[in-house]
Image (cartoon, rainbow, N blue to C red):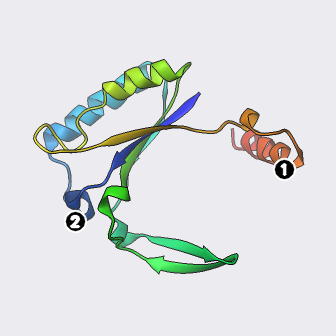
Amino acid sequence: MRFMIIVRATADTEAGVMPEEPLLAAMAAYHEELAKAGVLLDANGLKPSSRGWRIRYRAGKGTVVDGPFAETKELIAGYTLIQVRSRDEAMEWARRFPAPMGETADGEIEVREIFELEDFEQNAAIERFRQLETASH
């Protein structure tokens, strides 16, 4: 089972304020634990939405909308991707996640399970995804 631990953005992350060394050290220690346990797949911070864009679709036609985006609480500042045996194990790891904005600031993480190909009705399209997955490993 794969899970994404999503770090919610704040006004500071959207302003490009970089984490201080104690927070970076705590994050490094946590991610080292994940790696030693063999559950870490990927982890990264994201640059502010001012450096990004969205593509909005209306009637199947996409339009590019440049950042920044107003609803900071709906934005993502970073993520950690883990592969574990159960939802309970994912919950254990999530509870150990360091305070994402440091010990003195409010912050929030969200954890979401990632769909596996087995979750879908098996058909030709899913088989194409399976072939892509096999080719990338």
- For residue 64, which numbered disc appears in the image? none
> x, y (%) of residue 38?
49, 22
Q: Residue 31: x and y, percent?
A: 35, 31
Nearer-the-camera pick, 130 or 32:
130
Residue 96 in the image: above or below residue 59: above
Q: In screen coordinates, is 42 left or right of 56?
A: left
From the viewer's side, name the closer residue of 77 and 121.
121
**Label 1: element kind:** helix
Residue 5 lies left or right of residue 22; in this view the side is right
Q: Which residue does the numbered mark 2 point to in the structure image? A: 15
Identify which residue is drawn at 33% across, 65% down: 71
- Residue positioned 37% across, 57% down in the render: 74
Q: Is residue 126 left or right of residue 63?
A: right
- Estimate how packed mark 1 is, as few (under 14), some (14 to 19) or many (20 or more) residues with alpha carbons within 10 Å: few
Percent position of residue 73, x then y: 31, 57
Q: Quadrant of the N terminus?
A: top right
Residue at the spot of label 1:
125
For label 2, the SS is loop
Q: Amino acid at mark 1?
A: Ala
- Residue 36 placed where, x, y %? 41, 20
Relative vertical location of residue 37 with respect to residue 99 in this rendering, above or below: above
Outermost residue on the left side: it is 104
Q: CA distance from mark 2 to mark 1?
A: 41 Å
Tell me the kind of residue under disc 2.
Ala
